[in-house]
Image: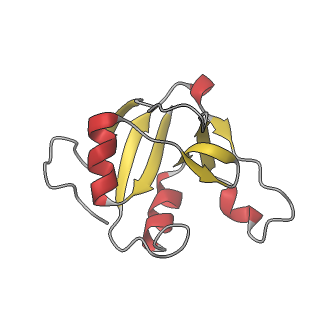
């Protein structure tokens, strides 16, 4: 399954070297991804969840379907429509672990100067 993760250039470099660290989000603790590149690009252009991401890198990854859950928004959330393309890889917040799916950076993970959007 092909998915996209939006992050900062520094975090992208760490992810490519060490794997993903989990973080808290609306669905729980884990890694949040997009099932649609256009949705990831829109999210990057908006500066992430709080608008503070001034430089964004979009990582394209490959993951097994069994590793990924759909984020089902609570009807009470102020923007449930924003979660249409959001997926996540749940992780245990009490474990010190990383998630290393097969991954590459757009447009090319061999580029040492991580391209920003």
Q: Nearer the viewer, residue 4 or 51?
A: 51
Coloring basis for residues: secondary structure
Can you name the residue that lies furthest to the left here?
112
Q: Nearer the viewer, residue 15 or 41?
A: 15
Residue 109 occupies quadrant: top left
Q: Quadrant of the C terminus?
A: bottom left
Residue under the point 47% across and 31% down: 97
Count numbered badges in the picture. 0
Position of residue 24 measured from the top left corner of the image (x, y, whole percent): 60, 51
In the picture provided, is 38 more to the left or to the right than 116? Answer: right
Q: Is residue 61 above or below residue 107?
A: above
Q: Is residue 36 above or below residue 2?
A: below
Position of residue 76 measured from the top left corner of the image (x, y, whole percent): 86, 65
Q: Nearer the viewer, residue 89 or 110?
A: 89
Residue 60 occupies quadrant: top left
| Residue 97 visible in the shown view | yes
Q: Nearer the viewer, residue 33 or 29?
A: 29
Residue under the point 23% across and 59% down: 115
Q: Is residue 80 above or below residue 78?
A: above
Residue under the point 55% across and 31% down: 95
Can you name the residue that lies furthest to the right here?
75
Q: Is residue 61 above or below residue 56?
A: above
In the picture provided, is 17 more to the left or to the right than 52? Answer: left
Position of residue 40 measured from the top left corner of the image (x, y, whole percent): 48, 58
Position of residue 38 measured from the top left corner of the image (x, y, whole percent): 49, 59
Residue under the point 32% across and 50% down: 12
| Residue 34 visible in the shown view | no
In the picture provided, is 42 more to the left or to the right than 61? Answer: right
């Amino acid at each position: 399954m092909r998915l996209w993760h939006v992050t900062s250039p520094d975090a992208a470099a760490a992810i490519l070297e060490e794997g993903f660290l989990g973080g808290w989000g609306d669905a729980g603790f884990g890694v949040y991804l997009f099932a649609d590149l256009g949705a990831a690009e829109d999210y990057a252009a908006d500066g992430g969840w709080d608008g503070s991401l001034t430089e964004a890198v979009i990582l394209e990854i490959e993951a097994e379907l069994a590793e990924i859950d759909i984020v089902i928004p609570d009807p009470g959330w102020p923007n449930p429509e924003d979660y249409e393309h959001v997926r996540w890889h749940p992780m245990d917040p009490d474990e010190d672990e990383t998630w290393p799916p097969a991954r590459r950076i757009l447009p090319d993970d061999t580029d040492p100067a991580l391209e920003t959007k």
